[in-house]
Every structure is written in C-alpha cells, then in structure tokens.
C-alpha cells in the first residue's frame, strides 16, 4: 500500500498537455446517499469523461449493487468510482467479482454497511479521504488501505471534508482518475 501524508495541496503535479487525442476514459460513478446523477461529482465526471451515473434507490443497498453490476456489464467502464455509500457498493461489486478493474473510492462508507471490510487481492484501488471528514472516519479508510494487494492500493489523504468539496472544486479528482486509468488499464492510445 502506498500512503501519502496529510496534504494541503494536491500530492502529484497535475497532468499537463492535451488529452484531445486520448480516447475518452469511461467512468462509472456510484453516488453517495446525498448524491444523484445531477450532483457535483457526477457533473464533474460527465464534463471530463464518458461517464455513466445511474440513478439509484439508496434505501436498497443490494438493489444498488445489482443495478451497478448490470451497468458494469453494459457500459464496460475503464474506471469505477464510488463515493461514500457508493464506495461501499463498489467494494461489494469487487467481492462479487462483478468488477476487477481500476477502482477509486471517495471517503468509502464500507464500515457502515454489511460488506467485507477488506479489498480483494489483485485489484487496483485508490482511496481519497478528507482529513476533516465528520461522516466517515478516516481511520476506516486507513484500515481498508491495509488490505488488498499492497502494490495496487493507494491512500490519498487530503485536507478536505466528507464531500471532498475543495478537491472537487480544483478538479483534482479528474487528474486522479486519469492517473489511475493510465497506470492500471487505459492507455493514451486511441
């Protein structure tokens, strides 16, 4: 596992150059309890990627897992992103073997739901968690990041809140998705 220290600025130099001749990265986004297909993160991903954010009934966890398993098969994304509740859904999908590709978890609420509290082996998973999160404990993400395949798991701690408002506002999630896709699947070839 690769853990970045607490930061106040983005931990990597932002990617520069044009992405015009790069095939659009396909991102399937699983929103959180307060999110929607029209939410801030969903709009950010739709602006920068070929994005799919299905509407879901967050009162039915297993229904959300089943919905996203079907969508994964249909949409065939390059990267799966899950935010909070959606992070728990994403981990459930990993354990069901509905997905084994690059996965980005944003303040994942894995310890709040009845899902395995560990990452499966062999799956690239990056976790972004705000140090000022008062909804999901950062310690939960730290524990989760100690599981899975160490060389494939990365924890990025940012000076932010649960919604990752500042990280979203600076479009840093866009760069993280691009890096995750480039390192674990999607190349710059068209």
Image (cartoon, rainbow, N blue to C red):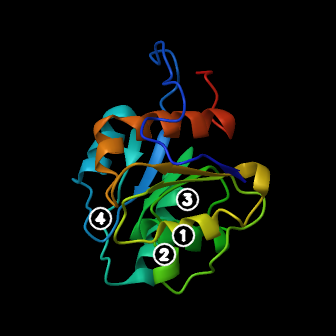
Describe the element under mark 3 as helix, strand or loop. Answer: helix
Q: Is residue 120 above or below residue 4?
A: below
Q: Earlier in the sequence, mark 1 or mark 2?
A: 2
Q: Earlier in the sequence, mark 1 or mark 4?
A: 4
Describe the element under mark 1 as helix, strand or loop. Answer: helix
Residue 80 locus on image (x, y percent): 52, 53
Residue density around tag 4, few if under 14, some if 14–19, many if 20 or more, within 10 Å:
some
Q: Which residue bears the numbered disc 1?
A: 139
Q: Horizontally, is 104 left or right of 100 in the view?
A: left
Q: Nearer the viewer, mark 2 or mark 3?
A: 2
Q: Nearer the viewer, mark 3 or mark 1?
A: 1
Can residue 170 be seen in this snapshot? yes
Q: Which residue bears the numbered disc 2?
A: 66
Disc 1 + disc 4, Cβ < 8 Å: no
Whole-number angstrom distance, CA of label 4 to CA of label 2: 13 Å
Describe the element under mark 2 as helix, strand or loop. Answer: helix
Describe the element under mark 4 as helix, strand or loop. Answer: loop
Residue 144 locus on image (x, y percent): 62, 68
The residue lying toward the viewer, choosing from 118 and 131, is 131
Q: Is residue 187 above or below residue 145?
A: above
Whole-number angstrom distance, CA of label 2 to CA of label 3: 11 Å
Q: Which residue bears the numbered disc 4?
A: 55
Residue density around tag 3, few if under 14, some if 14–19, many if 20 or more, within 10 Å:
few
Q: Residue at x 41, y 66 (%)?
A: 84
Q: Which residue bears the numbered disc 3?
A: 73
Q: Nearer the viewer, mark 4 or mark 3?
A: 4
């Amino acid at each position: 596992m690769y853990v970045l220290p607490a930061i106040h600025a983005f931990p990597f130099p932002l990617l520069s150059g044009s992405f015009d001749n790069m095939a659009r990265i396909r991102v399937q986004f699983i929103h959180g309890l307060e999110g929607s297909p029209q939410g801030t993160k969903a709009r950010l991903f739709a602006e920068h990627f070929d994005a799919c954010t299905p509407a879901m009934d967050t009162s039915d966890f297993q229904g959300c897992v089943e919905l996203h398993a079907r969508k994964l098969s249909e949409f065939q994304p390059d990267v799966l992103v899950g935010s909070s509740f959606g992070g728990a859904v994403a981990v459930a999908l990993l354990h069901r073997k509905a997905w084994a590709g690059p996965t980005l978890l944003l303040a994942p609420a894995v310890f709040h739901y009845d899902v395995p509290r560990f990452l499966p082996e062999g799956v690239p998973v990056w976790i972004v968690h705000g140090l000022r999160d008062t909804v999901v404990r950062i310690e939960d993400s730290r524990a989760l990041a100690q599981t899975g395949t160490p060389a494939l798991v990365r924890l990025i701690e940012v000076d932010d809140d649960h919604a990752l408002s500042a990280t979203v506002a600076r479009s840093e999630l866009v760069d993280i998705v691009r890096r995750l896709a480039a390192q674990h699947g999607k190349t710059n070839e068209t």
